[in-house]
Image (cartoon, rainbow, N blue to C red):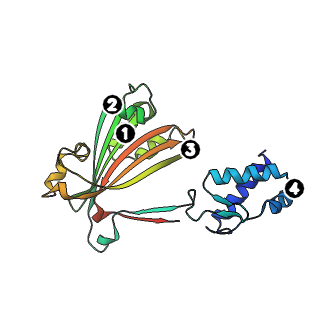
Amino acid sequence: MAAKYEIIEQDIKQKIVEGVFLPGDKIYSEADLRSKYEVSNTTVVKALNNLVSEGYLIRIQGKGTYVRRNMVKRKVLFSESFPSEKIKDKKIIENTETIIKYPLTNDALAKKLGDLTGKEPLIHITQIAYINGTPWKIQNRYLLNKYVTDEGIENIRQGGSVTKQLLQDTSDLHADISINVTNIEKDDEKLVLIQDYIKEHYKDIFKIAYFDIEKLTKNAENQIVEYTRSFIDPEYYHIDITT
């Protein structure tokens, strides 16, 4: 059973998520919370201080407790459009090329995937998505070899889903995502990740800005099972982020 201070925290978080309390709103006083939950002042203060530490609330001496206006833990809805609405009215022919390299070793990537020794063999899956013959997404996916069988690798090579292979060992996957915009410059290490074939489609690759998306996928036990680095042409990609 959850402790009383945890119940208070969860109830306040839920009211913030549901919009009962909006950023900048004043919430219950300490006296209100003591009466509402029939707890001591120590329990109330512990719950409120925890919510302040987590970025939900701010406390102003002599005035009360408020929902932070720039709330760190604000719920965010994230959606992507592939391809972008910019080309939705055009006739589109899509295809994907998949290149698999395994087993391979890379100390830095293995450690990023949770192998502290850096010695675990890896699988490197490169997927190039084309629209009307032009590559719009170069996706590099790295997995520890132990998470995918030889049969699974062959299924991926034939166009099967990488995610479905990972889900065979878990019922849940979640991800931490970082999105940036980057330019590819001469002698840039990122150039290795998008490969030379991209040059065939752009006269001056070094002046193109790409969405640079990094993702760490974790299983239900919070173990990292996949690291992904993607480069996407902004002409073919659209993001909506709503708080």
Instruction: Report how far apart the C-alphas of labels 4 and 2 lie in the structure.
Output: 56 Å
Circle 1 sits on which residue?
Answer: 142
Q: Element at badge 4? A: loop
Foreground label between 3 and 4:
4
Q: Element at badge 3? A: loop
Residue 167 locus on image (x, y percent) = 50, 43
Instruction: Report how far apart the C-alphas of labels 2 and 3 lie in the structure.
Output: 28 Å
Circle 2 sits on which residue?
Answer: 106
Among numbered discs 4 and 1, the one appearing first in the sequence: 4
Foreground label between 1 and 2:
2
Among numbered discs 2 and 3, the one appearing first in the sequence: 2
Q: From the viewer's perspective, is residue 210 above or below residue 87?
A: above
Q: Element at badge 1? A: strand
Q: Is residue 55 left or right of residue 241?
A: right
Near mark 2 (Cα within 10 A), the count class, few <14, some 14-19 or many ≥20, is: few
The amino acid type, in three-letter code, at marker 2 is Asn
Quadrant (top left, top right, bottom left, bottom right) of the N terminus: top right
| Location of residue 239 by image quarter | bottom left
The answer, for residue 149, to whether it is visible in the render is no
The amino acid type, in three-letter code, at marker 4 is Glu
Circle 3 sits on which residue?
Answer: 171
Q: From the viewer's perspective, is residue 182 above or below residue 156?
A: below
What is the count of numbered marks?
4
| Location of residue 102 by image quarter | top left
Foreground label between 4 and 1:
4
Circle 4 sits on which residue?
Answer: 38
